[in-house]
Image (cartoon, helix red, strand yellow):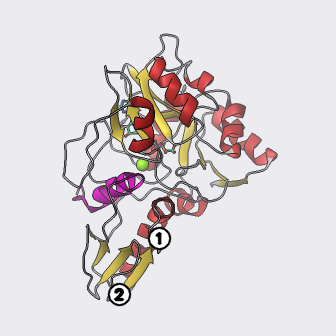
């Protein structure tokens, strides 16, 4: 049985008690719903991998109520502090050297000398993390390889009965996962485009290297498997036309002729498109399959701002599936 908790003081307290007892609780953040566990408890972290049916022990992001708590686990340099000042709370994850006295379990850090830390935005999320009082490991709250959940209903569709509770804080306003930036080397490296744009980061960091098109590159970060966020129907990228047996993931004015349409943003706004992306993939996938359509055609998304994160998720959705 999965408890449904509302975002009241009692709901938050119950969620925190469960997490402190080593149980699994999905909770909303500004990006997507996370599947939370006490990051200091190996057994609790192991339950995340089991519940998601994740085949590999990828390193997980640890979540904190504030920068001070985050920097007790990861060693900040000057740049980390400036980025935290500017973007936290918010959708930016920093990969930092682990603090010698840090409490994040080896399983959550996948045995690496680094740790990924994040301070999410949202009053309910912050209150929960403060009440837990320990780092909370949380990958997206979906079965491995499936589309990430942007509301509590999506979480339950995939994980009902497999997790102890879901804390419902409503739909996620950003809609794509956090940007992951590695600060352990001599210059910052973008490991995953996400809710904080490269352009915004570069205002603080200067130029950073970032692969940004649909070219199939090798994974640069553990857990960056090509196929991810995958709907059941195949996905065709940068579609300039559409056929009646295709479902159209539109952006801006729609190409006519599709069998089914979800428009990410009729006005062509990237923030709105990011927030509607995962719900759109789910809708086209289930409704498209019901109507016997054969494919999802995705219209081009500009390679700027949040468009990079959207393109990254679409590229993964279109990648060949593991058998
Ligand atoms: O928006 C988000 O970040 C969501 C919400 C729930 O907060 N969380 C999320 O967590 O996406 P997760 O654990 O699925 O993200 C893991 C990403 C992977 O790309 C992983 O490779 C990278 O973070 N990562 C974690 N620790 C790392 C490390 N020590 N070195 C390099 N990459 C790391
Ligand atoms: Mg995920």
Q: Is residue 17 magenta?
A: no
- Disc 2 under 8 Å from ligand 2? The reply is no
Give the x, y percent position of residue 46. Answer: 46, 35
SS label for mark 2: loop
Residue denoted by label 2: 259
Q: Is residue 271 above or below residue 246?
A: above
**Residue 243 screen position, x and y as percent:** 26, 85
Q: Is residue 293 above or below residue 100?
A: below
Which of pointers 2 and 1 lies earlier in the amino acid sequence? 2
Where, by quadrant of the figure, is residue 204 drawn?
A: top left
Mark 2 or 1, closer to the camera? 1
The magenta segment is: 304-322
| Secondary structure that dominates the magenta span | helix
* Residue 188 found in image quarter: top left
At a point 42% along the width and 47% down the height, the residue shown is 194
User: In the picture, which quadrant includes the C terminus?
Assistant: bottom left
Q: Position of residue 256 (x, y in %)?
A: 33, 87
Cα distance in 3D space between marks 2 and 1: 18 Å
In the image, taking residue 293 as reference, residue 30 lies left or right, namely: right
Can residue 275 be seen here? The reply is yes
Residue 145 seen in the current view:
no
Residue at 52% x, 20% y is 73
Q: Nearer the viewer, residue 278 or 3?
A: 278
């Amino acid at each position: 049985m999965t408890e449904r908790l509302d975002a009241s003081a009692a709901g938050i307290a119950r969620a925190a008690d469960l997490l402190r007892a080593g149980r699994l609780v999905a909770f909303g953040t500004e990006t997507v719903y996370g599947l939370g566990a006490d990051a200091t408890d190996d057994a609790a972290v192991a339950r995340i991998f089991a519940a998601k049916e994740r085949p590999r022990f990828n390193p997980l992001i640890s979540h904190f109520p504030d920068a001070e708590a985050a920097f007790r686990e990861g060693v900040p340099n000057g740049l980390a502090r400036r980025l935290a000042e500017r973007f936290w709370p918010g959708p930016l994850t920093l990969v930092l050297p682990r603090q010698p006295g840090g409490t994040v379990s080896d399983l959550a850090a996948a045995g690496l000398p680094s740790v990924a830390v994040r301070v999410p935005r949202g009053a309910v999320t912050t209150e929960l993390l403060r009440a837990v009082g320990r780092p909370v490991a949380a990958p997206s709250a979906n079965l491995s390889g499936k589309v990430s959940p942007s509301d509590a209903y999506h979480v339950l569709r995939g994980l009902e009965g497999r997790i102890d509770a879901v804390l419902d804080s409503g739909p996620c306003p950003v809609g794509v996962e956090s940007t992951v930036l590695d600060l352990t080397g001599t210059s910052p490296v973008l490991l995953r485009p996400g809710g904080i744009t490269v352009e915004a980061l570069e205002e603080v960091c200067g130029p950073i290297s970032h692969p940004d098109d649909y070219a199939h590159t090798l994974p640069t970060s553990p857990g960056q498997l090509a196929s991810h966020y995958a709907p059941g129907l195949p996905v065709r990228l940068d579609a300039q036309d559409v056929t009646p047996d295709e479902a159209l993931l539109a952006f801006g004015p729609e190409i006519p002729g599709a069998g089914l349409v979800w428009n990410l943003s009729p006005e062509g706004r990237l923030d709105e498109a990011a927030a509607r992306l995962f719900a759109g993939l789910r809708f086209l996938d289930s409704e498209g399959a019901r109507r016997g359509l054969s494919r999802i055609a995705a219209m081009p998304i500009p390679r700027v701002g949040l468009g990079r994160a959207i393109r990254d998720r679409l590229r993964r959705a279109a990648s060949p599936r593991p058998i």
